[in-house]
Image (tube, rainbow, N blue to C red):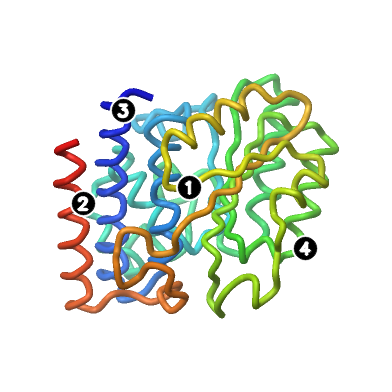
């Protein structure tokens, strides 16, 4: 990855995080914590990894992305908007009655959303079906899905993993956002899913462990995924919940709470400073 590519991804990620704050503040509701922890991943996918066309969201041969942890829609929407799928100015309408940007992704109303999600554990099953269909149809499209580390406490996740390995879905990449926190506290205390990579490997995956805020690590992991044949690939990302906003970082209380006006100003000032720094890289 060149220094310029890294700079542009860093700038884009700052804008995605700002979009998360705009959306949740505008809604007075939503899930900023997990949206911010996954912001770098959303950025890498939509600016570098996915074969997509914002001008043609329904392009038949596009890669697919399924946000299995659908409550982090603010992060996905911010990435889609900044990538050109719809106006960034619409982000503050999140969750409003007449807005097409509802609290969980809706493939029928939001350009760029490939699957309606929100019931935890189910998105990965949809991604498996998409990946198998692509293989059956002889398509080169790849399928990516993002799960939360709390979400993988769901039994259906592991049924889907068995399915993916059984059908040798090497066009599937399962990503786990391991920020360590869920709505009720630390995942290790609520119902420990650890060790995550080893579990995925036992279910028949090739697995990589990376820093989920390191674009170069993502580049290497996704390259490894494309080179892996005959089995699905998993990326377990160690991340910081609320990344980029000081008072939200590593705080379970920001799993599903919107910033008030004063908190909005603090967050946006911090992110604007990070954007200025990134632009000067």
Label 1 vs 3, first from the N-terminus? 3
Label 4 vs 1, first from the N-terminus? 4
Q: Secondary structure at mark 4?
A: helix
Neighbours of disc 1 within 10 Å: few (<14), some (14-19), many (20+) = many
The residue mark sitting in front, 4 or 2, is 2
Q: Tell me where residue 18 appears, x and y as whole percent.
A: 25, 56
Cα gap from disc 4 to disc 1, whole angstroms = 25 Å
Q: Secondary structure at mark 1?
A: loop
Q: Tell me where residue 196 appears, x and y as whole percent.
A: 69, 54
Quarter where residue 190 is shown:
bottom right
Neighbours of disc 3 within 10 Å: few (<14), some (14-19), many (20+) = few
**Figure quadrant of the C terminus:** top left
Total of numbered circles in the picture? 4
Identify residue for label 1: 212
Cα gap from disc 4 to disc 3, whole angstroms = 39 Å
Identify residue for label 3: 5
**Figure quadrant of the N terminus:** top left
Q: Tell me where residue 145 appears, x and y as whole percent.
A: 59, 45
Label 1 vs 2, first from the N-terminus? 1
Identify residue for label 4: 155
**What numbered label is drawn on residue 274?**
2
Neighbours of disc 2 within 10 Å: few (<14), some (14-19), many (20+) = some
Pick the front one: 162 or 129: 162
The residue mark sitting in front, 4 or 1, is 1
Is residue 135 shown left or right of residue 40? right
């Amino acid at each position: 990855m060149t220094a310029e590519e890294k700079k542009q991804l860093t700038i884009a990620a700052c804008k995605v995080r700002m979009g998360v704050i705009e959306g949740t503040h505008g809604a007075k509701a939503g899930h900023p914590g997990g949206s911010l922890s996954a912001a770098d991943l959303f950025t890498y996918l939509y600016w570098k990894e996915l074969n997509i066309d914002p001008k043609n969201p329904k392009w038949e041969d596009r890669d697919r992305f399924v946000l299995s942890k659908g409550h982090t829609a603010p992060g996905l929407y911010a990435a889609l908007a900044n990538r050109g799928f719809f106006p960034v100015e619409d982000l503050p309408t999140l969750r409003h009655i007449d807005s097409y940007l509802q609290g969980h992704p809706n493939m029928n109303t939001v350009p760029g959303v490939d699957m309606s999600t929100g019931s935890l554990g189910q998105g990965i099953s949809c991604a498996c079906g998409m990946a198998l269909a692509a293989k059956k149809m002889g398509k080169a499209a790849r399928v990516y899905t993002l799960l939360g580390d709390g979400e993988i406490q769901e039994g259906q996740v592991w049924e889907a993993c068995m399915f993916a390995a059984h059908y040798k879905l090497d066009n599937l990449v399962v990503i786990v956002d391991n920020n360590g926190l869920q709505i009720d506290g630390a995942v290790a205390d609520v119902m420990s899913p650890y060790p995550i990579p080893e579990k995925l490997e036992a279910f028949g995956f090739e697995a990589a462990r990376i820093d989920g805020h390191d674009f170069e690590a993502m580049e290497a992991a996704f390259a490894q995924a494309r080179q892996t044949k005959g089995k699905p690939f998993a990326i377990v990302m160690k991340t910081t919940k609320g990344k980029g906003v000081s008072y939200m970082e590593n705080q379970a209380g920001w799993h599903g709470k919107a910033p008030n006006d004063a908190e909005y100003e603090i967050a946006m000032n911090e992110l604007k400073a990070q954007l200025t720094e990134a632009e000067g890289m």
